[in-house]
Image (tube, rainbow, N blue to C red):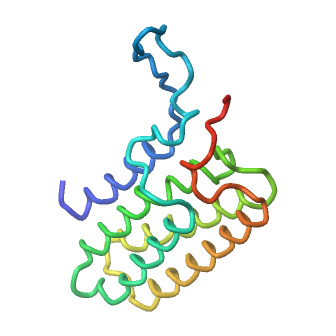
Amino acid sequence: MTTARRIPALLLGATLLACAGDTRTDTTPQTGTEAQAEPATNAPATIPGLPPGGLEDWIAEIRDGLATLPDRIASDIAGARTVALELYVGRQEFIEIFYGENGRLTAGGALGPAVEHAEEEFHELLLMLNGDETPDAEQVRAKVVALAEAYERVLEEARRAGVPLTPVATTPAGS
């Protein structure tokens, strides 16, 4: 399989894994206690790979990283693809886990749909970057701008909903 074909396959696999629900339970015995049976999803700090900071930090990192893509694609499309995929898996997926339609901190209203819209915009960018042809820099630039606007709406809706902007500062569900 060529590198050009492996990247979309990797992207699809990473997306499917990242979007899949976590159904594991923490069964590690604690000293002097029975094995715990609560789902690991109840404790935000236990999510593997959880980046530092919170919603504002993650969105800033996505914006900063994606801003470099239009100028990079002509000389380093593979690097641009890697940057975009790492930001998607390492930031967008955590935004979805906490603030998406069924997120741990979603308070209903317009926040979940705003996150879903941003994710759709990100998917379109990833598809654009992973096509058979090198994408046009201006099209990538326009998609990056659309994504920045979508994330601005996510921040507005999160503030309006009054949800914690830093997940690890919250009390785990069920406490």
**Residue 84 occupies which quadrant of the picture?**
bottom left
Residue 103 picture location, percent across and down: 64, 46
Task: Identify the residue shown where x is 43% and y is 67%.
Answer: 127
Question: For the point 25% across and 56% down, which residue is it?
Answer: 6
- Judged from this view, the residue extending furthest toward the left is 2
With respect to residue 168, does 162 lie above or below?
Answer: below
Residue at the far right in the pictured view: 109
Residue 118: % across, % down:
60, 67
Q: Nearer the viewer, residue 123 or 97?
A: 97
Query: Which quadrant of the structure image shows residue 16?
Result: top left
Q: Quadrant of the C terminus?
A: top right
Q: Is residue 58 above or below residue 107?
A: below
Q: Position of residue 20 (x, y in %)?
A: 50, 39
Residue drawn at 26 percent across, 77 percent down: 77
**Along the line of sight, the residue nearer the viewer: 131 or 24:** 24
Q: Is residue 100 left or right of residue 20?
A: right
Report the residue that reaches farthest toward the front: 32
Q: Is residue 63 left or right of residue 14?
A: right
What count of labels does the image hold?
0
Q: Position of residue 69 (x, y in %)?
A: 36, 81
Q: Nearer the viewer, residue 46 or 88?
A: 46
Residue at figure coordinates x 26%, y 59% from the top left = 5
Q: Is residue 165 above or below residue 135?
A: above
